[in-house]
Amino acid sequence: MLADFINPYHLQIASFILINILLAISVYVPLSSGQLSLGSAGFMGVGAYTSALLTIHFDLPIFVGVLVGAAVAGCLGIIIGIPSLRLSGVYLAIATLGLGEVIRVIFVNWESLTKGSIGLTGIPQMGRELLKLARNVGIEPAMFGLRNNQFVYLMVFVILLILVIGTIWFVFRQQNSRIGRSFSSIQMDEKAAESMGINITYFKVLSFSQGAFLAGLAGALFAHVMGYISPSDFSYHRAVEILIFTVFGGSEVIIGSIFGAIFLTLIPEVLRFVSEYRYIIYGIMLVILMAVRPQGILDIHLLSKFKRLKRSKGGVR
Amino acid sequence: MLKLTNVQTFYGQIQALKGIDLEVPEGQIITLLGANGAGKSTTMKTIAGLLKPKKGSIEFLGENVTGLRPDQLLRKGIALVPEGRAILSSMTVLENLEMGAYHRKDKGVKEDIENVMQRFPILFERQTQLAGTLSGGQQQMLAIARALLSKPKLLLLDEPSMGLAPLIVSEIFAIIKEIKETGTTVLLVEQNAKQALKIADFGYVMETGKIIIEGKSADLLTDSRIVEAYLGRKSTKVQEEVQDEGISASKQV
């Protein structure tokens, strides 16, 4: 039955894909206003640690922890975003990368709070809490013919899926609004945007802190899915990985970030049969892509081609 | 309408404007002339709020607007067409025009876009095209049209003729004259002194951050100092030749 189709391993990978989509979008949003931020790993860490500590020490419900974690990361985004406005391009990228490292080093050294590089254990897991909740209202996994762990992974996946769809919907709507137009005009030509009466300070900080909020949200979710976090989860490797999701998939369109996150999370899993060579293959793929298609796999032209193809097929029918 | 008193603007330590006094009366075209590096664009940027003056005051319609942000100034009615046609190249022509009306909340935007397109028929033809694919002159027209959609009381034009063919330049100048006739005041920065003075009512000449000459444009046209400084001839009798040279000079640009 249903139980035969649900493989916890597959569901867990799917959950990671969803978290990675959130992270990729957290790079995409600042980028849509022309700001290359590599601080996502740092903001992710802030979200993760905030939520983990709140739920461990104060017994807060997970959703409160996640919201506060994301909000703290977003506020930090505003604080960092204002002075960073003076920077652009590569300089902003380096500054935000530095920020991420500073955050990581704080996690390592503030041992009384963060337990240093050992990391935090015993973070309430979203799946288990959901199972408890379900049992309290009288729903047993067995009612659907599921084992407990299948039910847990499925619930986590569904919750993440809802959040990711909500985020994509929000970003998509925002893009076609006045705010999105200001973002893209700032990206195209800051001076022109300014002379059109767009308050570029406000919109740049807005997009930067939205990115920070999303990264914090992803980090908090990550903490409650894993149940264990350590500073090395938010190192600069993670920052680069997140950036590659967006750049690989296509940084001009939101679909690109989503595609990049899905594809690049799956690839190491799919290539497991060549075990030790898989990261080499992964690397070679990236090099080739950047040489052949620097704008990423998906861009506006490719998408409009797809659309036309669909339309012409519809016409034949 | 606009009054600058002893405006001084700095780029870091370097003083670009050393005390500018300038006045723009309503309903006229005022032109600001000068060689490269004289501070014309800096003056424009200071008026539009892109740069903040360290000293001095800017008054617009009797109100002190010194140090306001560009978006606040635009709401008050000062629109800048920046140097080098700053258009949004990966948006369509229509989207560019819509962006011009960004801060407006009234319902007349659609109508105004139609009116502007009537004035610039080429923009109507190409409305769905990406702005980056337009020619230089068309881009300049788009930049001007976009600024007009914010319904400015004062339009600041920073070198609209830069890099354009002579024929297009005359077209642009004709448009500027039309804009004035519809009641918008224009402050025009130009290198093309001859043509600018022809359509302007009053002119200022800048040099190294100061205004050195001011006067009615008819007087400036025959002023030997101007002819000397901008057209490379000392005598005023060779004006016809000078005019031709002005055109060939703009060709080279």
Image (cartoon, coloured by chain):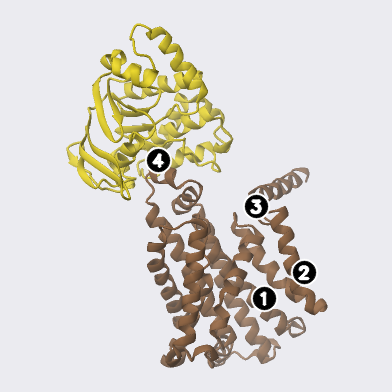
Chain colours: A brown, B yellow
Q: Which mark is residue B16?
A: none
Amino acid tagged 4 = Ala
A94 or A305: nearer the viewer: A94
- From this viewpoint, which residue is outermost toward the left? B62
In this figure, which residue is indicated by the disc labeled 2?
A281
Q: Nearer the viewer, mark 2 or mark 1?
A: 2
- From this viewpoint, which residue is outermost toward the right? A273
Q: Is residue B168 visible from the viewing direction of this image?
A: no
Q: Position of residue A7 (x, y in %)?
A: 73, 83
Amino acid tagged 2 = Ile
Q: Chain of mark 2?
A: A
Q: Is residue B185 left or right of residue B166?
A: left
Which comes sooner in the sequence, label 2 or label 1? 1
Element assignment for label 1: helix
Which comes sooner in the sequence, label 2 or label 3? 2
Q: Position of residue A201 (x, y in %)?
A: 38, 55
1 and 3 marks in contact (CB < 8 Å): no
At horizontal 49% and vertical 85% (from top left) the residue drawn is: A108
Q: Nearer the viewer, mark 1 or mark 3?
A: 3
Label 2 and label 4 in one chain = no
In this figure, which residue is indicated by the disc labeled 4?
B101
Q: Position of residue B179 (x, y in %)?
A: 36, 25
Q: Nearer the viewer, mark 3 or mark 4?
A: 3
In this figure, which residue is indicated by the disc labeled 3?
A299
Q: Nearer the viewer, mark 2 or mark 4?
A: 2
Q: Which mark is residue A14?
A: 1
Q: Using the image, determine if residue B166 lies above or below residue A268.
A: above
**Quadrant in the picture for residue B61:** top left
B67 or A69: nearer the viewer: B67
Q: CA distance from mark 1 to mark 3?
A: 25 Å
At horizontal 74% and vertical 69% (from top left) the residue drawn is: A282
